[in-house]
Image: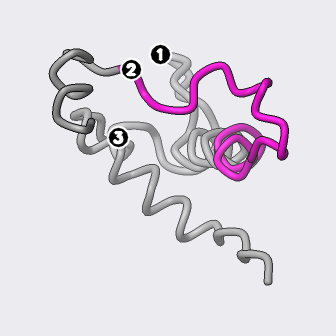
Amino acid sequence: MAPKPPTDDELNTLIRARLALLGIDLDQLPPGTAPDPVTGAPGRETALASLRSFLRTTVLPLGTYRFGPDHSLAQQTAPPLLYPSITEAWTR
């Protein structure tokens, strides 16, 4: 069974949480879809719609990508290690 795609509300929660971790508050943007006439900042709903579109078209497809049975396309199957010699010694 394929996973169901996230709803707009779920993506909004993810976006707001990730931006809050970076110290970015979307509530500072003007409400609605109209940009601020003075600063040109996009409206809050426009920014959220753009970020939702980015997540749906870029991040989610990349997250579900799997290499086929031929691993020759997998250039790196594990993330790089800070101290590979120590990890190699521990996992022998």
The residue at which mark 1 appears reads as: 39
Q: Nearer the viewer, mark 1 or mark 2?
A: 2
When the figure is inspected, residue 43 is found, relative to residue 7, above or below; the finding is above
Task: Please tell me the numbered disc located at residue 80.
Answer: 2
Q: Earlier in the sequence, mark 1 or mark 2?
A: 1
The N terminus lies in quadrant: bottom right
Cα separation between marks 3 and 2? 26 Å
Question: Looking at the image, which residue is at 60% across and 41% down?
Answer: 51
Q: Nearer the viewer, residue 13 or 59?
A: 59
Most extreme residue toward the bottom is 1
Q: Contact (CB < 8 A) between labels 1 and 3? A: no
Amino acid on which disc 2 is placed? Pro
Within 10 Å of the Cα at label 1, are there few (<14), some (14-19), or many (20+) other Cα atoms? Answer: few
Q: Nearer the viewer, mark 3 or mark 2?
A: 2
Question: Looking at the image, which residue is at 53% across and 28% down?
Answer: 36
Q: Is residue 15 found left or right of 52 in the rendered image?
A: left
Whether residue 38 can be seen here = yes
Question: Looking at the image, which residue is at 24% across and 42% down?
Answer: 21
Amino acid on which disc 3 is placed? Leu
Look at the image and give the residue range highlighted in magenta.
57-80
The residue at which mark 3 appears reads as: 19
